[in-house]
C-alpha cells in the first residue's frame, strides 16, 4: 500500500471512531485517544519529512490555535479541535478526484 492509501484509510477509521465515541459515549472522547491521534498524525508527517511536512505542521498549529479560541467560546468541544488538527496532519493536501481530469463539454 502506498502512503496516500494508508493516510486515507487512517482518516476514515479515526473519523469513524470519533463518531462512535460521540454517539455512544455521551459526546465524551477519551483524552488518550484524542492525543494518540494527534501523535499519529505527527508520526505520519515526520515519516517523510519534507516541505509538505512543514506545511502540514504549520496548518495543524493554525487549526489548533483557531480551534482553541472557538473551544474557549464554547462552540465546539476540545476533542473536535484535536481531531481537526490530527486530520490535517494525516492528510495535509487532499488528492484530486479521478474525474477532475476529464474534459466535460470540451472545456
Image (cartoon, grey):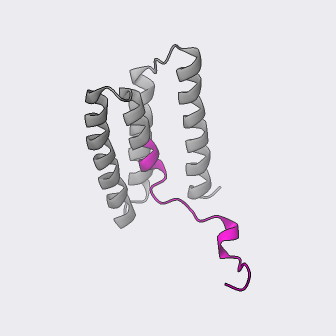
Look at the picture and state if 84 lies above or below 30.
below
Q: Residue at x 51, y 13 (%)?
A: 26
Find out whether residue 92 is within the magenta segment: yes
Q: Nearer the viewer, residue 6 or 8?
A: 8
Q: Residue 46: image x %, image y %?
A: 38, 53
Quadrant hosting residue 38: top left
Q: Quadrant of the N terminus?
A: bottom right
Residue range of the region highlighted in magenta in the rendering: 86-107
Question: Which residue is farthest top?
Answer: 26
Q: Residue 76: image x %, image y %?
A: 38, 29
Q: Quadrant of the C terminus?
A: bottom right
Question: Which residue is farthest bottom?
Answer: 106
In the shown orientation, is residue 10 left or right of residue 75? right
Q: Residue 45: image x %, image y %?
A: 41, 53
Look at the picture and state if 44 lies above or below 16.
below
Look at the picture and state if 89 lies above or below 34.
below
Question: Which residue is farthest right?
Answer: 105
Quadrant hosting residue 53: bottom left
Q: Residue at x 62, y 54 (%)?
A: 5
Amino acid at each position: 500500500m502506498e502512503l496516500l492509501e494508508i493516510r486515507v484509510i487512517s482518516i476514515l477509521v479515526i473519523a469513524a471512531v470519533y463518531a462512535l465515541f460521540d454517539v455512544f459515549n455521551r459526546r465524551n472522547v477519551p483524552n488518550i485517544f484524542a492525543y494518540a491521534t494527534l501523535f499519529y498524525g505527527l508520526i505520519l508527517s515526520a515519516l517523510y519529512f519534507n516541505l509538505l511536512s512543514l506545511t502540514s505542521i504549520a496548518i495543524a498549529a493554525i487549526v489548533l490555535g483557531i480551534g482553541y479560541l472557538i473551544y474557549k467560546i464554547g462552540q465546539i468541544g476540545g476533542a473536535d479541535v484535536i481531531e481537526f488538527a490530527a486530520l490535517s496532519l494525516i492528510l495535509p493536501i487532499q488528492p484530486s478526484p479521478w474525474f477532475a481530469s476529464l474534459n466535460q463539454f470540451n472545456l
